[in-house]
Each structure stands twice: as C-alpha cells, then as structure tokens.
Image (cartoon, grey):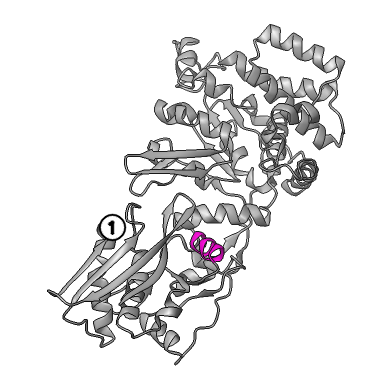
Amino acid sequence: MVAHAYTVAFEGVEARPVEVQCAVTPGVPAFAIVGLPDKAVSEARERVRAALTSMAIALPSKRITVNLSPADLPKEGSHFDLPIALALLAALEIVPADQVSQTVALGELSLDGALVAVAGALPAAMAAAEEDRTLLCPRASGPEAAWVGACRVLAPGTLTEVVRHYSGAAPLPPCEPGEVRPAPTQRDLRDVKGQERAKRALEIAAAGRHHLMLVGTPGSGKSMLAARLPGILPPLSAAEALETSMVHSLAGLLDEGGISRARPFREPHHTASMAAIVGGGRGAKPGEISLAHNGVLFMDELPEYPRTVLETLRQPVETGEVMVARANAHVTYPCRFMLMAAANPCKCGYLTEPSRACARAPGCGEDYLGRISGPLMDRFDLRLEVPPVAFADLDLPASGDDSATVAARVAEARARQAERFAGHAGLRTNADAEGRMLDEIAAPDAESRALLATAADRFGLSARGYHRVLRVARTIADLDGAERLARPHVAEALSYRLVAASEV
C-alpha cells in the first residue's frame, strides 16, 4: 500500500506543493527518504522513528520508502517531519489515509513527539487554500497561518494529538488568528530642533515613497530624522500586511503569530554582507531589502558599505523585486521599499566647515562620496544637505508640526494616490508611476516645462532624473491638495534634487 500526504517546499515567497508518498514493502528492514532531500530532511527518519517509539508505535521489520514528489525539486528544512510521519502512519493504517490526503502538513518533530514551530506557515496556508485543503501545523505556528481566512487551520501540540484527531477520539478545533501587534511607540518629529527643510523632505518622501539621501556633518541630525520617519508613515493596508508578513514568515520573524500593521523599518549595519542585504545564503533566504518590503530601508553611513553591496541595490530600487540566483536555487522576493540613506560629506565629516575641515579638502569629499556611483545616486528622488544646528537653536522651544499632524497630511496624500491608482495593478504611490501613467498624472504646464528645460540644460538632468522630479512634484501637489502641477511644485522638487547633485 502506498499512502499519500501533502506538504510544501519554499521557493522565495512561493510555496510549491509536494506529495509525500510512503510505501511499506517486504524486504531488508530500512527507512529511506528519496526525492532530493537535504541533510535536515534526510535526518527526519530518526526524528520520526523516535517520536513514534515515544507513542509506543514500533516500526515493522520491513522496507519503508518515502518519496518526495516532484523528485527534481530541492527539499530543504525540518518542516517535512510531520508530513513524513503522517504518510507513514497512513501506510501502517493507524490513521485514515483518505483524511490524511486532504491535508497539507508541515512541522518539526521532537524526539518525544512534540511539534516544534517552523518558518513559512503563512505561505503554506496560502498554498493549502488554493488546493482547498486543511493545513496541519504546530500549535506555535497556527495563529500565524490562521490569518489566511480561506484556509482551515489545525494546530496540534504533539503527534499524539494528531493521531487522536484522525481517529476521532479528540478532534482538533480550528485555530484562531493571532492578535494584531500594536505599533511600537514612535519618536516625535518635534524633538528635532531646526532642520525645517529636512523635515519637509521627510514628509514628501513619506507621502510618495520617494528615496531620500541626507548629507551632513556628524551630529547634524540625520539619524535622528530617520528614527522619526516610521512615526509619519501610514499603517499597512490589509493586503500590504499580508504581503509583508509572508516574507517575515519565511524569515521566522513573526512572534506568536502576530501580524503588525506598522511598516517595516530596517537599518542594517554597514558591515552587512551582500547575502544579508540582498538575500541568499543557505536556502536563498530573504535579505534586508525584502524584509523592508512596503516599508523603509535606512542605510546610515552609506559610503561605508562595500561597493558590491551598493551596486546590487540599483536594480531592486527600480523594479521592486530581487532575484536571488544560486547554483541550486533561483528565487524571487518582493522588495518595494523606500530607501533612506545618510552620509557625511567626507571621511572626517567636516568638509563644509572651513575651521574644522582636514588639509585634504576638497579632495577628501570627492573621494569619500565618490564611493557612491552616479547611477545609484541618480536613483535618489530627494537629495539635500543637512547643516549643523547652532548651539543657540538647541535652547529654543520645539518648533514645527508634531509627528501626528505630519502623519495626517501624509495619510491624506496617500489616500489621493490610492484613489488615483485604483484599478491599476502594481501602482500604489507616485513613486510607482511611469510611462503613460506618469505623463497623465504629472503633466507640467508651460511655465513648469520651461523651468524643467532650463534646469535640465544647466545641471545636466538625466532622463531618469527628469521623471523623478515629476514624481516628487506630483507628491508635493498631493500634499497641497492640488489637482494639477504648478510651477511652485516643480521648483520645490528641483531644489531637493540639485543641492546634493552639485556636492557629489
């Protein structure tokens, strides 16, 4: 008799269905797992054997063969333990084979039969819903998977509970979704003294998901501004929260099955490797740019990152997805994020202060910022200098709007964009618009077009730079509640692009 169970293998955020076939036949006693398993899957036979022994179930003195189909698809991870055990129990006629075949299972087994949480329960639930099957997963992974409302999720704690469920002795109740995690306490924008121009740029970037580059001396407030960006971003929509959580599920970052509506804010250190930033390593796991999907990737001290890491950002910033190509895996992850970067003007940091600049000025600034290639710099929509704050200004009371007020304006601008792009797949913010759509929503009038032509001639705007100016101008118009672009919107957008261009 050949029994069948079902599980999934992960390729990026996609869960590929895998059929687990188990045959118990006469012959030399053995327990073999075939179908391109990795080391963790091959070791499942010992965990399954020990778990069954703890339940007083002895394996027969026969040849047990488990095949993971399709056989040419790599199988990685310990989540194959539970489906292998289910297929074996069905082959031994301990549980009904017809009920097992209606289930997608994943979970790691302890030697005593307890089920251990595994990564990827949310994508697995999506795959089970598409196949109209029930998902069986460990109790700790159930609240996460239950967020897929179209899928019935059962979450036992032990293999004994699984057997009792299928035998009808103690049916498992459907699992309930985990709680929505509250947003972390955000820092207020009013804590930043001065820097009104930088605050305005931060608001524009948040409203249109524009990439932002800040250049300034040490202590001028670049990192302080970045830390307050999450406080003005709108919460994730239901669809965005599900997209983001699927990536975080694969990375094992969902605590107790809770899904957060706060946008991700990732800030990797400049010593991070390419695999950590872009993705890769064992199993081609998602990197920081994918963990920042629908959120913010903040890269402090941008010139300090390895040149190879910086150059790999060019394509994901444009396309919103990244393909991690390895010898045995080609997986694609979403990475539609807002890139915010900060840098000193030179190695010592005081190039713009004559009294403190080093003797190598201005060459040290050219060498230092020259580590950021022109094509990457051209992808920043807003680039501006953050000057140092005078000591006298630090004693003044807080000025400007607080984060809640700015967040309300950002939310209104995002709502206008959501209405504008309704019905256009893949378009959510002004930063996503291109081609004919950009021409429709950001058509400059005669005065604005003349201003753009003058700026392009004088400062050498590239075609990419021209379109990015139009996107930023459209966002500024949305913040002002204007239907059409006007000269002031274009002028302000140009001012944020040309300041840092002259420095670099």
Q: Main secondary structure of the magenta part?
A: helix
Q: Is residue 122 visible?
A: yes
In the displayed structure, 338 sits above or below 240; it is above
Find the magenta span and give its range: 123-131
For the residue pair 273 and 362, the one nearer the viewer reads as: 273
Q: Vertical placement of 38 versus 136: above or below?
A: above
Circle count: 1
- Tell me residue 9's x, y (percent): 40, 57
Residue extending farthest left? 28
Residue 170 location in percent, x, y? 46, 90
**In what quadrant of the picture does the C terminus appear?**
top right
Q: Where is residue 187 drawn, in percent x and y?
A: 64, 49
Left or right of 235 in this view: 162: left
The image shows residue 486 at horizontal and vertical percentages of 85, 24
Mark 1 element type? loop
The residue wearing badge 1 is: 37
Residue at 84 percent across and 26 percent down: it is: 485
The answer to whether residue 241 is magenta is no
Residue 229 figure quarter = top right
Q: Residue at x 59, y 65 (%)?
A: 148
Quadrant of the image occupied by residue 114: bottom left
Above or below, 418 against 502 in this view is below
Quarter location, residue 337: top right
Left or right: residue 480 compared with residue 305:
right
Of residue 357 and residue 299, the one placed in the foreground of this image is: 299
Three-letter amino acid code at the position of disc 1: Pro
Quarter of the picture holding the N terminus: bottom left
Task: Count neighbours of disc 1 (C-alpha within 10 A) and say few if under 14, some if 14 to 19, many if 20 or more.
Answer: many
Does any portion of residue 272 appear in the rendered image? Answer: no
Q: Is residue 448 left or right of residue 87?
A: right
